[in-house]
Image (cartoon, rainbow, N blue to C red):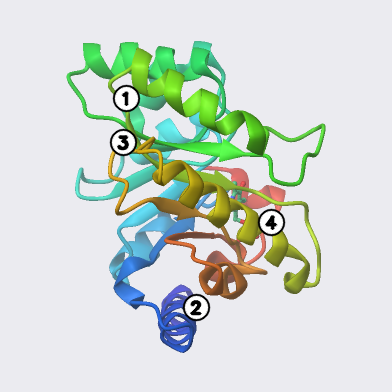
Amino acid sequence: MICDNLTRILNTIAQTARNAGRNPKKIKLVAVSKWMDIKQIQQAIDCGQILFGENYLQEASGKIQHFPRTINWHFTGHLQSNKAKQAAELFDVVETVDRLSVAQALDKHAKLLKKELSVLVQVNTGREKQKSGILPEETEHLLRLIAKETNLRILGLMTLPPFFSDPEKSRPYFKELKNLAELLAAQDLFTDNNNVELSMGMSGDYPVAIQEGATIVRVGTALFGARDSKEALL
Ligand SMILES: *Cc1c(COP(=O)(O)O)cnc(C)c1O
């Protein structure tokens, strides 16, 4: 089941990329495994998946320790500075940095761990009050501060647009993130300005995100099936 889903998703990613004139190898699938148990994650690993995303630190720490170091983990949940130590320990990439204080806290703990930590800056393209992320017009300033004050590797930008059942409605937000990233890359604000990562697109809209330039898509439900509260048990 998970293998079939994974094959289908990887085929869709490859096909969509080719149709858009893009190299499918430039697109990474983050398997968002929040609420999924170790068995389900292991199934995905057995089918060849090595990159996973988790949203909740406590849940993630109970799971990540079961897997070998060769498995890569992205943090995709909301992060507070007082949880930065755990996030720096557990994750290879934190996708949700949206304040200097969080970046500084991650940097401090990454240094103590002698670990090279990579981040994405989360942009609130939908300008939703309840949502994390920095506003598009404030992103440049934040990137300058993170580059000046920390040794974090700033890989690119991430966004979580408002939810629509029609994936076409997400397209303008993806376009906006891509345009913003190009503007900022032209000012050398990322660690590698020729390879800026754009994390955008989930189960319902990842093909649209790929058409608009996503290099990372974060897919949960389409891979593992629906999340219900029973599955939260480890
Ligand atoms: C849960 C989550 C996803 C995956 O969502 P699906 O619709 O299940 O694919 C992706 N990104 C973030 C930030 C999430 O919290």
- The residue that label 1 is drawn on is 89
Which of pointers 3 and 4 indicates the residue nearer the eye? Answer: 4
Residue lying at 45% horizontally and 87% vertically, measured from the top left: 15
For the residues bearing labels 2 and 1, Cβ distance under 8 angstroms: no
Q: Where is residue 99 shown, x and y percent of the image?
A: 56, 21
Q: Where is residue 229 shown, x and y percent of the image?
A: 70, 48
For the residues bearing labels 3 and 4, Cβ distance under 8 angstroms: no
- Above or below, 1 against 78 in this view is below
Q: Nearer the viewer, residue 126 or 64?
A: 126
Q: Secondary structure at mark 4?
A: helix
Amino acid carrying label 3: it is: Gln
Residue 93 at least partly seen: yes
Amino acid carrying label 4: it is: Tyr
Give me the C-alpha separation between circle 2 and circle 4: 26 Å
Give me the C-alpha separation between circle 3 and circle 2: 25 Å
First in residue order: circle 2 vs circle 4: 2
Residue lying at 81% horizontally and 63% vertically, measured from the top left: 164
Q: Secondary structure at mark 2?
A: helix
- The label number, if any, that marks residue 5 in the structure image: 2
First in residue order: circle 2 vs circle 1: 2
Q: Where is residue 173 shown, x and y percent of the image?
A: 69, 56
First in residue order: circle 3 vs circle 4: 3
Which of pointers 2 and 4 indicates the residue nearer the eye? Answer: 4
- The residue that label 3 is drawn on is 65
Amino acid carrying label 1: it is: Glu
- Above or below, 90 against 174 in this view is above
- The residue that label 4 is drawn on is 173
Amino acid carrying label 2: it is: Asn
- Above or below, 207 against 139 in this view is below
